[in-house]
Image: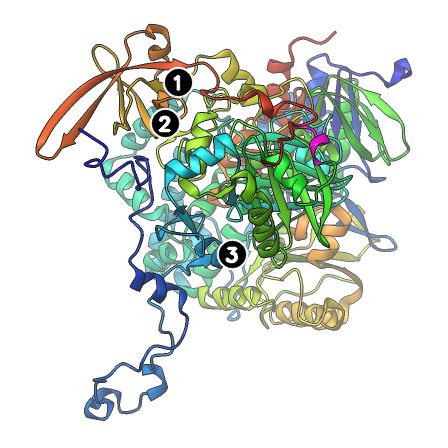
Amino acid sequence: MTQPDHIYDVIVVGAGHNGLIAAAYLGKAGRRVLLLEASTHLGGALTTAEVSPDYRASTAAHLLEALPRRIEKDLKLARHGLRYAVRRVQTIALDHDLNHIMLSTRRADIDILRRHSAADAEAYAAYAARMKAYAALLGPMLHGQLPSDDAQSVARRLRRLVWRGERMGPERLEALMRQLPGSIGDWLDNTFETPLLKGALALDAMLGNAVGPYEAGTALTSIGRQSLRGLSGGPHMVEGGLGGFIDALAAAAASFGVVIKAATGVKKILVDHGKVYGVTTHHDETYEAPIILSSAHPRETILNLVGAKHFDAGLVKQVNDIVDTGVTAKLNLSLDGLPTIQGLAPHGYNARFLIAPSLAGLDDAFTAFKHGNFASDIPMEVTIPSVADAPLVPHGQHVMSIVMQYVPYSAEGGWEQHRDRLVDRAIETFSQYAPDLRTRIVAGELMLPPDIERKFGLANGGWYHGDMRMDQMFAFRPTPALARYATPVEGLYLCGAGSHPGGGICGLPGEYAAHAALIRGGRGR
Amino acid sequence: MNDDTDTTISDGPPPFDNEPKAAPSDDTMIAAIDDGPTPEPVGHVDLAAIDAVTQADPALFENENTKPPFSRQVMTTPLHFYVASESLTNLWCHWNGYTVAQCLTSIEDEYAALRQSAALSDISPLVKYRISGPDALPWLRRFVTGNLETLLVDAIIPVVFCEDRGFVVGDGMLFRLGDNEFRLITEETYLAWLLDSTIGYQVHIEDVSTTLAAMSLQGPLSCTILAEAGLSGIENLRPYSAHWFDVAGMPVYVSRSGSSGDLGYELWLDPDDAPSLWLRLLAKGKPFGVKPGGFTLREIARVEAGIPRAGVDYLGVFSAIDPQSVLTPYELGFSALVDLEGAHFTGRDALRAAKAGAPRHILATLAVDWYQPLRFTAIRDASSIVGVVTSSVFSPMLGINLAMATLNPSAIVSGTDLHVEAEMRAELSLQIVKVPARIIAGSALLLPARHLVPAPLGMRP
């Protein structure tokens, strides 16, 4: 007999940001919601922790770049403590010759670009405008709700897309049709001549994706990223690291009556006659609810939490075939002072730095990655969050947060013998721009793709619960039969990044899944 | 028109429209079986004379493989030479890539033996899968549409399996050999689908077709002959069950099953033992009139019994190109094999909807009342073509033509005025006859002995 306090309207499995957002929306709609999280901390890969005693930083992801303002307002996150250390973090491509390029269309920044190439300075504004127009055109498809599953809605959506496309003008539309299936590398080669500018823009587009700059489909990937940024107004740095974002989400969810239980891992989602009715936890407690949303990876949800026997074989095969590729490692460094980045103005230290001197270098790094290796010059995205958010560290100290792109899941002969070399390469790469970095390091932590997998349950250390590539997007995400959050098991919904529109910390899968559950699940008791 | 002029009946096969091509001539048969080296081709191009390839390794031009590219290896069953020695016709056909006898003596003789005594056939080309492992039963429960709760060890049930949209992938017979061991017998190969569907289960699936020989003894005296051959207690074997017997030191797994609509048994054993059992059954059965039978006999019997054959009467969903030509179990007449109320199986949700909706096609057996074999492919009503014939045979016992056809549901409703048009040629005179056809509910020929326990034992003549 289940105790009365173990019965809810909805149970949400997994308190990552999507789980929290789904739970908050359901709570806001008046449902009694229980949110269960296996780990002792909430937020999954969005967490702030100590790099070394007293030095804190975002452990894995470190920027919030795609959270729609709508979600922020709906859930009143500002009231629940969401503060930005830096809004619209500037992006700076670091240059060996100290002419660092700021990726923006401000006149002063364009003038710096002119030192590299007058032609590029001319072309940049047009490129940015074009990218923005493409993002505006494709955005509703890339991250809007999917049309409902009937031919009419799909046709209506496509008609609207064509109409909006035609409004862009035939010349732009033609250019888009030509560029969309192609690679970002070719596109940039045709637009710019400065290697650094091209490298930085390409890295910015592909960070976290296991693709090279010259792979087909990367043009779409970069438009997708651009349109996600459009939702939030650009990458933001959260006060207290991304853990601060999660704390605000948890407070918002709690304010809507969501009961959050950490350290309560779900062992099984219980199904009877094709309907969910509850979950059992690893402590062998049972909680009951007629609706369950899982923010776990679709494969984990279908194969382990529910079990293959409740699904058709073809569906299970498709879910099992979802591709996850880990492509990044994270290095967090505790520093006893601010390293001097040569040629950088003092106000530039709260930016995000991209290190990708050229497309060729990026492509080489990708080739090394494909062969289970890492390049000698590692493409990376670097922030020094303590510049704008001093409370993270003791006075006068700093933390540096480095995302390394093109680091494979497994290295030949095991990671143990390559770890130190990778750290050394990363520090060496950044030291080319900040020669005193090495002397400032107090401590550090390295998270390789297998560490990310182990710690956050992200398969192969991939960020997105299924790589963000064309065959795993839109109505194919995670599989055609599961694309609209509901599953063949009645009352079971998927609300994680594995569902449309996918990963990137946008929270939209959580929001859309909550809506789907509210519509299908009818009114609460 | 008389029998002598009609080449399709007396010694040839009945007119299956999908019948394998005419038997190869003696020469091709020998060439196909003989794997020995062929003489070196003569008249090679002189390599030294070609400037551009002076550096080329001559070994590249050596004719290593004497087989033409993409040629299929002709496979023979473990019983091939013993069957061949019975053949008076030298008529062969292909079944699942194996060379099998089409007809050994004459189809009338073989049919007479089948319905009056017993006919022994080599059914080794059937596809056999061994399914084992701790999750074998749960996996099968999700794999097939039927209810397996009553499937005990040594029992057999017919099964059908679908993909997610509820369309039939294939059908077969499922044997339970042990608690966690099963055998699935099918007409076509489904290994890719079987393996794809094992994700999430601890189950091992193996194609054991080549390591297991099989023969079928069907007919009213089949039990008698087996008893005579030393299978004591065989008469107590119930329909759709199986038992291990020791026959002259050979372990033989005997199941009371078959596709003849009559009393019959299928025997499963080691390929090395198969020839001796074959010879033993022929020898012990000789006084009772047993005859070896070919593939044509099997086709006639299964159409009489109303059993559709995968790949012929319906296409599995993974072999069909046109989505309109795939069928649900309901359309295929397998509704008794679908249990929507039990545990989840692949395609259940889709089949719930399919059951509620109207069928798009219906597979049925039709009787075409004509005293001679006919050739036809269209089933017509007063105005149009309402069905396509996929198998047709002449039933000597019923004296009529039988056809398996996929019909529009409208044909069932209108029902009465179905007919076929057949062209009949006698020398140079051509006659087009319009013959009425009627849908047979169930099977055309089912003999009561198939149910009897103990099975009837005949007297030694």
In-front residue for pair B150/B35: B35
- Work out whether B9 lies above or below A98: above
Q: CA distance from mark 1 to mark 3?
A: 54 Å
For discs 1 and 3, the disc positioned in front in the rendered view: 1
Picture coordinates of residue A123, whole percent (x, y): 34, 53
Tell me what residue is drawn at x 57 percent, y 65 percent.
Answer: A369
Q: Is A385 left or right of B329, judged from the image as shown?
A: right
Q: Is residue A208 magenta?
A: no
Q: Is A434 left or right of A27, judged from the image as shown?
A: left
Residue labelled with disc 2: B324
Tell me what residue is drawn at x 56 percent, y 17 percent.
Answer: B352
Picture coordinates of residue B333, whole percent (x, y): 49, 21
Residue labelled with disc 1: B360
Residue labelled with disc 3: A203
The tally of labels here is: 3
Residue B23 in sight in this render: yes
Q: Is B337 left or right of B233, judged from the image as shown?
A: left
Q: CA distance from mark 2 to mark 3?
A: 48 Å
Q: For the N terminus of chain B, which image quadrant?
A: top left
Figure colour scheme: rainbow
Picture coordinates of residue A7, whole percent (x, y): 83, 16
Name the mark on residue A222.
none
Disc 1 to disc 2: CB gap under 8 Å = yes
The image quadrant that residue A240 belongs to is top right
